[in-house]
Image: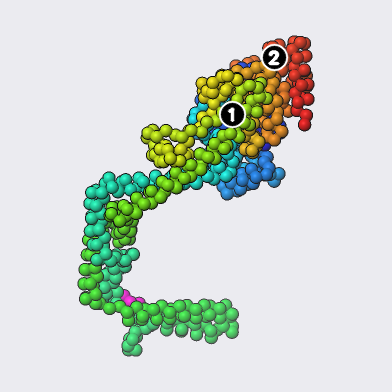
Amino acid sequence: MLEELRITGLGVIEDTTLPLTRGMNVITGETGAGKTMVVTGLGLLFGGRADAGRVRADPGRAVVEGRLRLAGGVASAVHTRIADAGGEPDDDGSVLLSRTVTVEGRSRAHVAGRSMPVAMLGEIGEQVLAVHGQSDQLRLLRPAEQRAALDRFGGPEHEKLLESLRESYAQWRRVSDDLADRRRNARERNQEADLLRLGLDEITRVDPQPGEDEELKAEAQRLEHAEGLRTAAQTAQHCVAGAAEPTDEMADVTTLLGHARRTLEAQAGVDRTLGDLAGRLEEVATLVGDIAAELSGYLAALDADPARLQTIYERRAALRGLTRKYADDVDGVIAWAERARTRLSELDSSDELLDELERERDRLAGEVAELAARLSVARREAAGRFAEQVTVELAGLAMPHARIEVAVLPRAAGRGEPTLTVDGVQVGVGPDGADEVELRLLAHPGAPSLPLQRGASGGELSRVMLAIEVVFAGSGGPPTLVFDEVDAGVGGQAAVEIGRRLARLARTHQVLVVTHLPQVAAFADRHLVVAKDTGGAVTTSGVRVVEDTERARELARMLAGLPDSDLGIAHAEELLAVAARERRP
């Protein structure tokens, strides 16, 4: 659940904190007081799009903070995702979320004390929160959303079948597009393939090796300067280890070090310091001896070979011929050859490959058709259960004679989609199958069965939406549900029934409701009022919890606009008493 929500600098809200509880939280207030900013703040906190126009000029940024405390599988999934991103929940298991938006439109997010991409808030939001408002009702009128709602109701096995269809569909379209492209552009493909083969043949004849150009360059330099290198090495060896001819009177480093060491060792008994220095000179002498041995080996290996140098010149010329055409260096030439081989396999338009692709396309088409047929059967079965359960809920929402039907129809061919034969009928097929799903409402006995967008009024659509959410809630879903004025256009007994249904949802979920209806607000476990302050130069709003008498006065205001009316307060207290009885298990 969301334990606490703090909003700063957003719209008319300067700085306010909403203490939330389990069960049903209701938010009320005068029109324009800022109730919408609460829902906007929730949207920002869970990764929604930022609108810099809603940020208050002073202090120049809006901050929304929230504390989540989760349980069960949702907690495990969210905590694991946060840990993977480098965050860590608090010691008590709660998670702090934060979103900041500046007047310039810059946005930052923090999760569990770590800076995170805003998309991380969206991922968490999908797990823990579902927001339903009037825009969601409009979305429910779209056929694609109705199909998605039915698939969601179908359950885990239904979703696995849908995912299998999507994977097979993607493979089928990929193979179909590849085959069509190879046939359509065969001439251009063959021309490109011929050029690539010429290049590969040339590179294969030269057979360059990784790093070969640099190695040959270094070897050529040694051969070109062999005499200078020999002179330098011989001079250094002479200085270090002495000349090969004993007649040379020049003292070498090894001899001088030996003399110095022996001189110090002779006085080591008098002063130990000189003995330590003599030992260090012995170490230096050992190192000098190693250098002398390596110089000797270098001289033995150094060879001025004109034939080898000519071979290197010719090899480097061949490599330069490749680097002028294909890349800046030999390693780049080798990489070009690898890409060319890959591209050649893509360009293959041989009859054998085309036949193979055609067989694979047909096989995948049959697989997609078979899965689409199975999905249609599953949807029709789910449609019956879904319609029955939503109809039962509508009866409890003061629509006792209304009935919901869910029609699962074959998708008509010829709409720019690929077509397949599914159950003997040519239909259009997409990644979601070959069905059109349409929610229909029979408002009363004898009324025609009409699509929701034609057969439902605003109030009826609100109740259908709520009924669907109640049905979904029975099969899990996010632990926190937000309803933003979904009771618009409803009143009287229907409003009371909406309150009852929301209270029922609140037994298993945390429910946040923004409402104008006192009949709904009366069922709240916690009642929050957004109040506007126009006493200063700038209008601001804050949120406070109302209880007991103060709550009755707020309901009286909602009933008649008269918070101090004795009759209104009496009516409000009656509403609260009825709601209290209804909330008892």
Q: Quadrant of residue 553?
A: top right
One can see residue 248 in this view: yes
Name the amino acid, label 1. Answer: His
Looking at the rendered structure, which numbered label has been put on residue 559? 2
Residue 192 position (above or below residue 310) = above
The residue that appears at 46% across and 34% down in the rendered structure is 410
Cα distance between the residues tagged 1 and 2 = 24 Å
Element assignment for label 1: strand
One can see residue 58 in this view: no
Q: Position of residue 23 (x, y in %)?
A: 71, 32
The residue that appears at 22% across and 61% down in the rendered structure is 321
Image: magenta residue range: 232-236
Q: Along the polypeptide, which appears first: circle 1 or circle 2? A: 1
The residue that appears at 72% across and 24% down in the rendered structure is 523
Dot 1, crowdedness within 10 Å: few (<14), some or many (≥20)? Answer: some
Element assignment for label 2: helix
Name the amino acid, label 2. Answer: Leu
What secondary structure is the magenta-colored segment mainly?
Answer: helix
Residue 363 position (above or below residue 372) = below
Colouring scheme applied when the structure was drawn: rainbow
Q: Left or right: 522 with respect to 205? A: right
Q: Left or right: 430 with respect to 474? A: left
The residue that appears at 48% across and 36% down in the rendered structure is 435
Q: Quadrant of residue 484?
A: top right
In reply to whether residue 234 is colored magenta, the answer given is yes
Q: Position of residue 55 (x, y in %)?
A: 54, 27
In reply to whether residue 184 is colored magenta, the answer given is no
Residue corresponding to mark 1 = 132
Task: Quarter of the image for the C terminus: give it.
Answer: top right
